[in-house]
Image: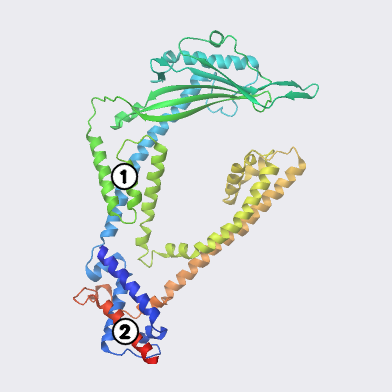
Amino acid sequence: MVEANLVSACELVCVQQCSDMEESSDLYDVYGTSGPLPRSEEDLDNVECLRRKIKYFFMNPCEKYHARGRKPWKLILQIIKIAIITIQLVSFGLSNQMVVTFKEENLMTFKHLFLKNYVDGVKDTYAVYRQDDVYDHIDYIIEQYGRLHNITVGNHEYQKDGAFYTPLSLCQEFYRNGNIYPGNETLDIDAQVKTECLKVYPMYHPSLQQALSHFELHFKRMLSVKITFVLKAINLQTVRHRELPDCYDFTVTIIFNNQVHSGRIKVDLENDVDINECRELKVTGASARNIYLTVLFDCLIIITCIASFTLCTRSVISGIQLQFVSTNYDVCSIFLGTGTMFVWIGVLRYMGFFRKYNILILTLRAAFPNVIRFICCAGIIYLSYCFCGWIVLGPYHEKFRTLNTVSECLFSLVNGDDMFPTFENMKQKSSLVWIFSRVYLYTFVSLFIYMILSLFITIITDTYDTIKQQQESGLPTSELQKFLSVCKDLPNSGVYRLHKNNRCFFNCCISRCRSRRERLTSEA
């Protein structure tokens, strides 16, 4: 297979070199154009032989099979690789789904365990407004943390450092010094932020008063209160799927956010997950056969990917990673998902051999330069609207609060999504800003949907029409296509079979180059 490709490549190189050395009229001598005729019968045979070989090089796998009986091994290998990698992707996706479910349900569990009177769906409205409520909520968290063994229905456990449990960390961030008198409109404050942290060990102090009797919150200067602790758990749902369970470290952080100093302290619970291999695993009643089959399946994928020339590097890296029990699901999912995407896209190069199926590839290839130039110009206008909306509408519309949300909102408007809520949710506190928002949104929608998006579609459509007309007319568009258009031999005619003189293209190159050299010498 490799030798055949090298021979075909040499044919193309030879044609290019010979065509560069000869006059342009010589290429058209054999198909009826004006100019001198070939010098001998041998020249005609050599040119015809070379033309067939080049035409064979551009045949699709089915035509090559009819021409020489060569089976499309590369296409078969590509299909096999797509099948096994897709199966592996589905298997990994199902396993990753269990991981995501376990993480999300533990997050919800922690909110119900440690946030007082928590109700599902109140993330943006869960807050405290009184000083006693802040102390009460902190005291509730410490009590729940100390009674974890008696209240949780899961397999949660404290983290240990040697023989001792790791403590709960209670940190308060506040301005170092400050005298604030809103009634007199006076302020004297030190902007340096000071952090004060205290430790509370589990199962020793049942309440805040007993654990930290001298603990005091500086509400007027306070920026935030962070309570951090680590809990451990084991994901047992993978056992029934014949997979080894993983051990999880949940770093729970409860934040009392008072940075706005508006009298409303938002309370939020965040959960960072670290997945590790369990130190000791003993699972009885389950066969290890599936594990061995998974390892063999991974090895098959590695062998298949190595055999694939165009995707070998990426496949080998993915295959080596898949030999171990990988616990970094995010990185593994990115590599596996991206690799599978490129594997499927790689099939398009085989579709390009068929004239009726390669219209998409040819259109993308031809329109790509114009599309890039158009996107650069349209991107400048898009960014100008992003910055303008962020600065002007940000204080009055939640979708324009950050530059990221502005970009997402405008991109949704371009696609026709979420239009009415964007207009409706604009606050009418300032008449001038409200009028500006209408002009801003109407001009953006009109400009991008009716003009820029239409021009973008027109670029693709014009390129598609041009390529379609070329295919329907069947006229050769390049020197090589004109050279090959003379050959009317069908793939199943038998003339493409290899014989002893299968190296005739070298004789063609040598003879034609030698003739050209002799002609130049005689003219000199």
> In the rendered view, would you say 24 is above or below 457?
below
* Residue 187 percent location from the top left of the image: 76, 24
Q: Which residue is mark 2?
A: 514
Amino acid carrying mark 2 in the image: Arg
Residues 215 and 439: in front is 215
Residue at (23, 39) in percent of width and height? 293
Q: Position of residue 216 (x, y in %)?
A: 62, 14
Tag 1: Cα neighbours inside 10 Å, few (<14), some, or many (≥20)? many
Task: Residue 400: name its quadrant.
Answer: top right
User: Does residue 78 appear to the left or right of 140 in the view shown?
Assistant: left
Q: How is the image coloured?
A: rainbow
Name the amino acid type tagged 1. Answer: Gly
Residue 251 shows in the view: yes
As drawn, the residue found furthest toward the left would be 500
Instruction: Give the foreground label among 2 and 1.
Output: 2
Q: Residue at x 34, y 61 (%)?
A: 350
Left or right of residue 417: residue 94: left
Q: Quadrant of the C terminus?
A: bottom left
Q: Give yes or no for contact between labels 2 and 1 (Cβ–Cβ under 8 Å).
A: no
Q: Relative to 480, is 297 on the left or the right?
A: left
Residue behind mark 1: 319
Q: CA distance from mark 2 to mark 1?
A: 52 Å
Where residue 94 sits in the image (x, y, percent)? Answer: 36, 38
